[in-house]
């Protein structure tokens, strides 16, 4: 542990530039991008040696994804749940207010995005430790990445004079420059990429917010004064700021709200490999190139192709005679893009949203606190889903007014409640749930339960549900 630091993970963001793998309902920080690990998994593992108690800030819809990642790492912590997105100034404000309400009212806070890839955990820990003296002296420390090329997608930090505490004074922040300006910054030798990683004392941040964005701080104070708390089944604590007070807060990044106007800002260079994994070009660069500089993940094949990236986790995808392409395949959407258009994928998402295309924001496979479901097929009066239930988990006790359901178990053991009856089903057994009948599905076993659900009826929308009992706080009060 480093000087009793409390790591704070910022889990917001929709990751639209990594569509179709990343979508609003399941953004890039939760997607297994590096092997079978998500960027959030790797962030938690990187921060665990730094602080024993981790805080995270996420949207309500993603609370169980964050809690599950923390549980998988054997960590319990506080999860601050934003009712609406209000950018990083508000997120960091509520985290500082929460941290300052504990036994130590002025802890050191390390704010880190959940979606960065920093593989050298040891070097990262040493870099953070080198900023502690400046943070204890009252500065806000921002960690800048030593640039490797004239990037136009990042903001820059201009270093000033070195300080005796091992940090550097910040002369200026520069927003995303063009290629010519970025090249000049690299040649000057005093520029760092702005990684959005900050270290400071809670009271220092709150005082800076009071000085430069008092309206944001006031709204967050009101939201936290009447926040509710809930202990999840895995031991994590859910903290919900007051929805109306938080929604009244102005949305602004911490860079504009505090960092640029504040005087006591210093920087510490972060050396080694770093990526914000902000585009498919960045993801491709995480793969080792093969013959003809093709980079392939999964079931991709390249023939007479050069400089082509293929991400094909589910089925064979063949690139024939292609050059400088990015190809990303998912079960319900396919992206084929010129390599130099990687930054414009977010415009594709906007176009699909305008066309009311569901694939713009959600996958066919939807994560739930109890497991997941995957839509396989659908027609005018039927729908077929695969459903997976975690060991020991259960869906809510519920009923549907407009549809009946047939369940066929293909893996594990199901405990079924249907009306007054409760019984077990094993592999290759099935049951029928009539429309209007109270029912529940649970997994009493130690392996994942998987079944096929066939819905039939006049209306098959997800909102045709009345929950009578629920373990996940989803019954309206």
Image (cartoon, rainbow, N blue to C red):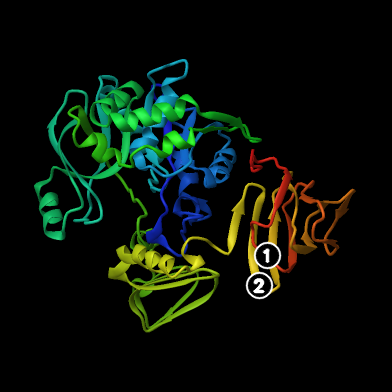
The Cα atoms of the two marked residues, 2 and 1, are separated by 10 Å
Provide the residue designation for mark 2.
378
- Residue 163's x, y, as percent? 16, 26
Residue 364: give its label. Answer: none
Residue 371 placement, left or right of 355: right
> Eyeballing the image, is 164 above or below 181?
above
Front-most of 339 and 78? Answer: 78
Residues tagged 2 and 1 counted as in contact (Cβ below 8 A): yes
> Eyeballing the image, is 408 above or below 275?
below
Q: Earlier in the sequence, mark 2 or mark 1?
A: 2
Front-most of 385 and 309? Answer: 385
Provide the residue designation for mark 1.
460
- Image quadrant holding the C terminus, namely top right
Q: Which quarter of the picture shows residue 233?
A: top right
- Image quadrant holding the N terminus, namely top left
- Residue 393's x, y, as percent? 72, 45
> Eyeballing the image, is 341 above or below 110?
below
Residue 24 placement, left or right of 206: right
């Amino acid at each position: 542990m480093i000087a009793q630091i409390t790591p704070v993970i910022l889990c917001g963001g929709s990751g639209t530039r990594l569509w179709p793998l990343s979508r609003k309902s399941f953004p890039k920080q939760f997607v297994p991008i590096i092997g079978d690990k998500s960027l959030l998994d790797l962030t938690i593992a990187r921060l665990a040696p730094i602080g024993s108690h981790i805080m995270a800030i996420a949207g309500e819809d993603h609370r169980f994804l964050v809690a599950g990642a923390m549980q998988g790492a054997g960590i319990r912590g506080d999860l601050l749940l934003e009712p609406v997105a209000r950018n990083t100034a508000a997120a960091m404000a509520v985290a500082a207010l929460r941290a300052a309400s504990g036994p130590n009212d002025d802890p050191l806070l390390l704010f880190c995005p959940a979606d960065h890839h920093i593989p050298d955990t040891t070097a990262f820990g040493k870099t953070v430790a080198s900023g502690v003296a400046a943070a204890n002296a009252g500065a806000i420390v921002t960690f800048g990445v030593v640039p490797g090329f004239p990037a136009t997608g990042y903001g820059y930090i201009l270093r000033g004079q070195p300080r005796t505490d091992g940090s550097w004074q910040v002369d200026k922040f520069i927003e995303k420059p063009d290629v010519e300006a970025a090249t000049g910054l690299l040649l000057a030798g005093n520029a760092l990429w702005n990684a959005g990683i900050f270290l400071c004392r809670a009271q220092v941040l709150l005082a800076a917010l009071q000085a430069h964005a008092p309206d944001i701080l006031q709204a967050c104070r009101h939201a936290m004064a009447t926040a509710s708390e809930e202990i999840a089944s895995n031991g994590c604590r859910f903290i919900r700021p007051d929805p109306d007070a938080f929604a009244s807060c102005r949305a602004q990044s911490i860079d504009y709200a505090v960092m640029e106007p504040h005087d006591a800002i210093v920087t510490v260079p972060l050396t080694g490999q770093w990526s914000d994994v902000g585009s498919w070009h960045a993801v491709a660069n995480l793969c080792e190139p093969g013959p003809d500089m093709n980079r392939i993940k999964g079931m991709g094949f390249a023939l007479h192709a050069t400089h082509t990236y293929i991400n094909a986790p589910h089925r064979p995808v063949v690139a024939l005679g292609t050059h400088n392409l990015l190809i990303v395949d998912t079960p319900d959407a396919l992206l084929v893009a010129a390599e130099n258009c990687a930054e414009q994928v977010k415009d594709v998402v906007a176009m699909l949203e305008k066309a009311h295309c569901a694939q713009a924001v959600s996958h066919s496979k939807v994560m739930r606190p109890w497991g997941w479901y995957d839509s396989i097929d659908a027609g005018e009066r039927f729908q077929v889903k695969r459903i997976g239930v975690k060991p020991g988990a259960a869906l809510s006790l519920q009923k549907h007014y407009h549809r009946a359901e047939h369940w066929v178990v293909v893996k594990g053991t199901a405990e079924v409640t249907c009306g007054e009856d409760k019984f077990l089903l094993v592999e290759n057994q099935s049951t029928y749930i009539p429309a209007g009948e109270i029912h529940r599905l649970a997994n009493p076993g130690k392996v994942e339960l998987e079944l096929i659900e066939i819905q039939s009826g006049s209306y098959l929308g997800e909102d045709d549900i009345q929950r009578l009992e629920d373990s996940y706080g989803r019954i309206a009060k």
